[in-house]
Image (cartoon, rainbow, N blue to C red):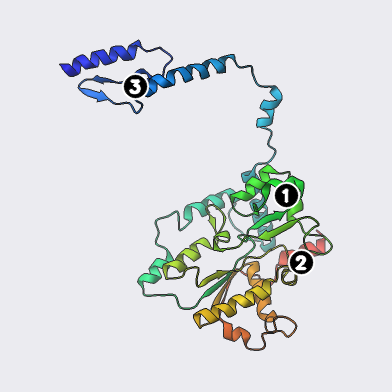
Amino acid sequence: KRGARGGKRGTARAKAGPWWAPGWLVGTWAQGGHEHVQLVSNRTRRKLVLPCLVVFVAVLLAPPPPEKFIDSLFDFDFDPIEEISKVGDTFVTQWKELANLEVPNFSFDAIYYSLMNDSAILTESKRPGLEQWEKGLRKEFPIVIVPGATTTGLEIWRGKPCAKAYFKQRLWGTMSMFSSLAGMESSCWLEHMSMNHTTGLDPEGITVRPAEGLSNVEYFMPGFGIWAQIVESLADVGYDNSDLYVHPYDWRMDASRLQRRDGLLTRMKHTFESSFEVHGKPACVLTHSYGDTLARYFMSWVESPAGGKGGKGWVDKYIHRYVNIGGPVLGVPKGESHTQAKQ
């Protein structure tokens, strides 16, 4: 009976509230023997009534914003996802034309979302590293990774006034790239991504450098991982950042300019030598795409008297295995056709 009477009184209180008030402001009640509990206390509700009224009246009485202001909110002429799709579809179209492949029609959007859905991190399938660990595989040799252009992020250290708000932000790679693309003029972004047309080095007043560290080469963007699954599987068999090295680089330049500006080849030589001193054994090299071209150049350079001066036998001593993942060992045939067509 008390529950029933409480329900009637509670219902009366709820009905007594103003018609415009939301339920969480009206009150609580018990009905049918069950008590309805609100997350906001009565005291808090009473405190919120006046501010809500003030906001409501202010919205009613406020003058409409200028038409120009409203238009500016939607004045975007760049859609990152649309642009990525266009670039991806262009790659697919050009490759099909080059190789004359008979494959079903598909879009870059489908490939991108397929990559996200099939990512080892986003699925419940067991990682290869865990499977090998269960079979008894353990780490043995240190590993040096030389990534490709896709996952080698580039960040701005010095730039023109149009890019002053993007210090140490990504111009290439991760979602920060889209933030930079959306926030600055496309001509400004392109100017900072371009090299000097005469020297092939930095343009005047602009400094863009590769982002360092394993975390900066694992993903091109969320869900689009190149090295992430490999690094995770290597960790499964015992590797960590004490025996897993990475050498990002500015993929806009060739190896000789990378050595001249950044000392890349010299730093790679020091990495192999210091790793050998720490672990007492040579390292394995994992390369991808353009990183494979740099690694093969390095192995010639390091033994050359005009290069690294390591002498004959340096590679055999400090490099145990060399693994090429998608490296262009036969060159890039599309480049030849573009050169002939003067494109």
Task: Please report the residue visible at 39 percent of the width from the left and 56 percent of the height from the top.
Answer: 124
Identify the residue under disc 2.
336
Q: Which label is found at residue 189? A: 1
Q: Position of residue 321 (x, y in %)?
A: 55, 79
How much space separates mark 1 and mark 3, taking CA atoms? 55 Å
**Quick one: label 3, few (<14), some, or many (20+) residues within 10 Å?**
some
Q: Closer to the observer: label 1 or label 3? A: 3
Do tag 3 and tag 2 residues touch (Cβ < 8 Å)?
no
Disc with the residue nearer the chain's start (1 vs 2) = 1
Q: Secondary structure at mark 3?
A: helix
User: Is residue 189 positioned above or below 319 on the image?
Assistant: above
Task: Please report the residue visible at 54 percent of the width from the left and 52 percent of the height from the top.
Answer: 222
User: Is residue 72 positioned above or below 163 on the image?
Assistant: above
> As drawn, which residue projects farthest toward the right?
198
Do tag 1 and tag 3 residues touch (Cβ < 8 Å)?
no
Q: Quadrant of the C terminus?
A: bottom right
Q: Quadrant of residue 33?
A: top left
How much space separates mark 3 and mark 2, taking CA atoms? 77 Å
